[in-house]
Image: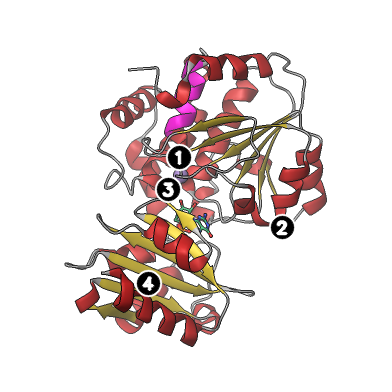
Amino acid sequence: MQNKKSLETALISSLQELLTDRQRQISIVVHTNPDGDAIGSALGFFTVLHRLGYSKVSVIAPNAYASFLHWMPGNDHVIIASEKPGVAKAAISNAHLLFCLDFNGFSRAEQLENALANSKAIKIMIDHHPQPEKGFDLIFSDTGVSSTAELIYEVITALGHEDAIDLDAAQCLYAGIVTDTGSFSFSCNNPRTYEITARLIGKGVDGAHIQRLIYSTYSAQRMRLLGFCLSEKLVVLEQHHTAYISLTKDEMQRFDHKEGDTEGIVNYALSIKGIRMAALFVEKDDCIKLSLRSTDPVDVNIFAREHYNGGGHKNAAGGKSFTDMHNTLMKFEVLVSREFI
Ligand code: 5GP
Ligand code: MN
């Protein structure tokens, strides 16, 4: 079962050696707009390191994240760089070891990109996205796992510390697996994912409880925003097997928008019969953020890389558009009609 390609003995031995001194500063960084897998992986790993006696461990997120992730044990320790840039950057530049979780290129940490690139720390990537970039000293990269949380479990186990995964850590890792597989509805055909899930459940995780914490905590306004998207904003391009939803800042304000409220909306567009690609366009201060989802054989990672300066996975990716909403949607319609399906 063990000995995955991403967990070669030499790589694990190198990490083991780097982790010898428990007094040194360790910083764990996740990507911008962190999702359940990013926060779950980081806090799961943080909790285990703490339990093993590492005394100086920081967790840094580039920006704030959805409140349905705030229940995770250790959440109060997360440094939000957009709120405390000095503290976050100091934690990165002073680190002896820098773990980059759930991303594989410094630019994904946006405002922390330069701090990461310039830090003298030993940089360790643990991630499951395709096409890892350069700049890291150790790379644990496996596109075959469901989530970074699954890979964190594998790394901790390969280091000989499975026992240090307590209930708090198990809940975080479980949350990462659940969110990155859409509650075991995609990226979930590998038996190993379920073996790890079973181990986490064995440590006391209450799967139904965590499901409620993540997915049944909508505010009434968030629910109404979803209703608005589906009834007023959904565009279906049937002939191109594509559906999309767009949201302007004004529209989001009407529904008292909070961080994370648009999360998951894109999946509704993909759940229409015959639709192979779905997109959500959300107006931000400096750009329009795109979320893309697909079913095979459509590859939205390539689509996002080619047209939207983005990336992600084959079936879930993101990117940005730097023109207004009208032109962004026109370009998107042209792209899908011309070259896509
Ligand atoms: P989401 O649509 O939920 O924001 O992101 C879906 C997937 O695409 C996630 O794996 C996320 O990390 C990745 N992703 C989102 N936006 C970007 C981006 O701008 N660049 C890259 N490289 N990946 C992105
Ligand atoms: Mn992930």
Mark 3 vs mark 1: give the one in front: 1
Mark 4 vs ligand 1: CB below 8 Å: no
Does any atom of ligand 1 lie closer than 8 Å to the CB of label 2?
A: no
Quadrant assignment, res 16: top right
Residue matched to label 4: 226
Instruction: Give whichever of 268, 147 is nearer the camera.
Output: 147
The residue range painted magenta reads 150-158
The mark that comes first in sequence, 4 or 3, is: 3
Check residue 280 for magenta coloring: no
Give the quadrant of residue 94.
top right
- Label located before the other in sequence (4 or 2): 2
Q: Which residue is mark 1?
A: 128
Q: Estimate how packed mark 3 is, as few (under 14), some (14 to 19) or many (20 or more) residues with alpha carbons within 10 Å.
A: some
Q: Is residue 262 visible?
A: no
Element class at badge 2: loop
Q: How far apart, in angstroms, are the residues tagged by discs 1 and 2?
A: 25 Å
Report the amino acid beneath label 3: Leu
Q: CA distance from mark 2 to mark 3?
A: 25 Å
Among the two numbered marks 4 and 1 on one chain, the one whose residue lies closer to the N terminus:
1
Identify which amino acid the numbered label 4 is placed on.
Leu
Q: Which residue is mark 2?
A: 82
Residue 58 picture location, percent across and down:
70, 36
Tell me the quarter of the image containing the C terminus: bottom left
Of tags 1 and 2, which is closer to the observer? Answer: 1
Q: On residue 213, which mark appears?
A: 3
Gap in Å between the C-alphas at discs 4 and 3?
A: 19 Å
Give the side of residue 300 with respect to residue 319, left or right.
left
Disc nearer the start of the sequence (2/3): 2
Which residue corresponds to the image point at 54% horizontal and 84% vertical from the top-left? 324
**Image coords of residue 25 (percent x, y):** 76, 28
